[in-house]
Structure formats: structure tokens, C-alpha cells
Amino acid sequence: MIQNTQFCPLKNKKNVKMKNSMLVASITFLLLGSCTVIRPGEVGVKQRLGKLSEKSHTQGSVWYNPFISRVIKTNVQINDIELSLSLPSKEGLSVVAQISILYRIDQKSVPKVIKSLGLGYEVIISNVFRSASADVCSKYFAKDMHSGMRAEIENAIKIKMGETLSDQGILVQAVLMKSIQLPTGLASSIEQKLQAEQDAMRMVFILQQEKLEAERKIIEATGTKDAQMILSEGLTDQIIKIRSIEAFVELSKSTNSKVIITDGKVPYLID
């Protein structure tokens, strides 16, 4: 009996030490499990007992009770949704298009977005786009989607989507029609029309060049005529005689023998 009494305090101390270790481990686990990190480009919102907090948390550490709450993280950077669909045109044709929707969540509206739309808000964005694009594209001809009016159509769809989504905290940055596939017959017609327009523009350019060349020749001929008239008016008999004498003088300077034939009316001087 005495021996058993001696070992009881040691056993109790060992049990207490083990309990303390387990308690420390449990507390450490709870502390580590109740902390999450919000990274750049994210916003976190606490949900406690199913109730969503109105306060949002930006980058940094967020502490919470893992048994009764959680932190919902949402990306607030610009995101991209890729869609492929047929768009109606004004003349009733279907135009196949590859669409890219650039959007982001308003940082201050993250709790509102989660509460009203949930985390599957991209489905809502896609549905809003389908409705807006059908409404806008039906006002344009198919050829307009393949021409310089594409930017106008993209902007009109963006504005139409914003009327529905901006109040919900979703900001549409851009709508990009990356590729347009027109019906085969229409595509050929457009190519032929563009070719005809290019030919017409080339012909106009040629005609303008010919007109300018004709005007240049007229101006050149007029200048030559005027110069000849001025020259003929200035050539009097006296000037002709003087020029003849000057020519004879130049000829006389040559050492070669020469024969000069005149009409006898032009005076000459020979040394």
C-alpha cells in the first residue's frame, strides 16, 4: 500500500502534463484554423450563422470562429467571360460571333453581390449579355458587324448591360466581338462590293491624276507660247544684226578655216 501511494503523485503529474499539451494543441489548432488571408485583388466577407456581414475585408489577415462562421472570398479584378453564340441581324440573318465580356465586381458592393446574386454571378452576366446583344444587334445589318460599325455595336451592348448590372454592383468594362462569321452568300456579296468600291476609288484616283497631268500640260504649253511671243516681239532687226555680229566674232576666234554664207544683209567684222 505504501508503494502505491508513492507512485500516485507521479502519475497525476503525467496526466496533467498530457492534458495541458492537448489543450495547447487544441487552442493552436483553433487559432490557425480561424485565420484566413485575403490576397491582393480579393475581398472577403464574413458569414456568421448564415447571416452575411455588410462589412468587407481587403487584403490582409481575417480572424473568425470556424465553428459558427466562414469568410467568403470574391475576386474584384477584371475578369473575362468567353461566349460563342448566334446574333440576329436587322434583315433576319444569324451571325455567329466569338464574344469576350470584361467585367469586375465593385469592391464596395461585394456583400450586395453575394447576397443578391450569389457566387454564380457569371451565369447572370451571360444571360444579361444574351438579352442585350439580341436587342442591340437586331437594329443593325449583318454587314455592319463586319465593318467599322463593330465598335459602335460593342459599346451599345456594353451600355445596355450596364443598365441592368451596374445597380447590382457588377461593372462591365468592355464587350469585344473578337470574330464574326457571316453567312456564306452574304460574305461573298460583301467582298464583291468592297472590291467594286476599291476599283471605283482607284478609277477616281486615275482620273484625278489624268486631269492634273492635262492641266499641267496646258500650263506648260501656255508658258511656252507666251515665252515665244515675248521673244518674237523683242527680236527687232537691230537686235538680230547685233547677235549676228557677236556670232561672227566668236567664229573668228577659231584658228580653223571656215566658210561663212550669209544673205549679204548682215554686217560682219573680221580681223
Image (spheres, rainbow, N blue to C red):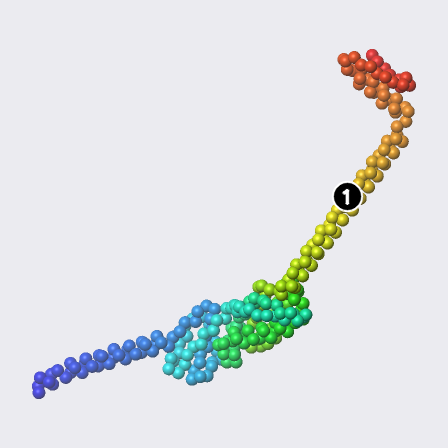
- Observer-nearest residue: 228 or 20? 228
Q: Is residue 245 visible?
A: yes
Residue at the bottom extreme, as displayed: 1
Q: Is residue 137 visible?
A: no
Residue located 71% across and 53% down the image: 199
Residue at the front extreme, as displayed: 185
* 214 up-or-down from 108: above or below: above
State the image coordinates of residue 194 (x, y, percent, origin top left). Answer: 68, 58
State the image coordinates of residue 218 (x, y, percent, origin top left). Answer: 82, 41
Tag 1: Cα neighbours inside 10 Å, few (<14), some, or many (≥20)?
few
Q: Which SS class for mark 1?
A: helix
Residue located 91% across and 24% down the image: 237
- Observer-nearest residue: 165 or 45? 165
State the image coordinates of residue 213 (x, y, percent, origin top left). Answer: 77, 43
State the image coordinates of residue 128 (x, y, percent, origin top left). Answer: 58, 75
Residue tagged 1: 213
- Residue 103 appears left or right of 210: left
Quarter of the image holding residue 146?
bottom right
* 222 up-or-down from 65: above or below: above
- Looking at the image, how many numbered discs can be counted on the residues? 1
Residue located 84% across and 34% down the image: 227
Three-letter code for the amino acid on which mark 1 is drawn: Glu
Residue located 37% across and 77% down the image: 34
- Observer-nearest residue: 40 or 229? 229
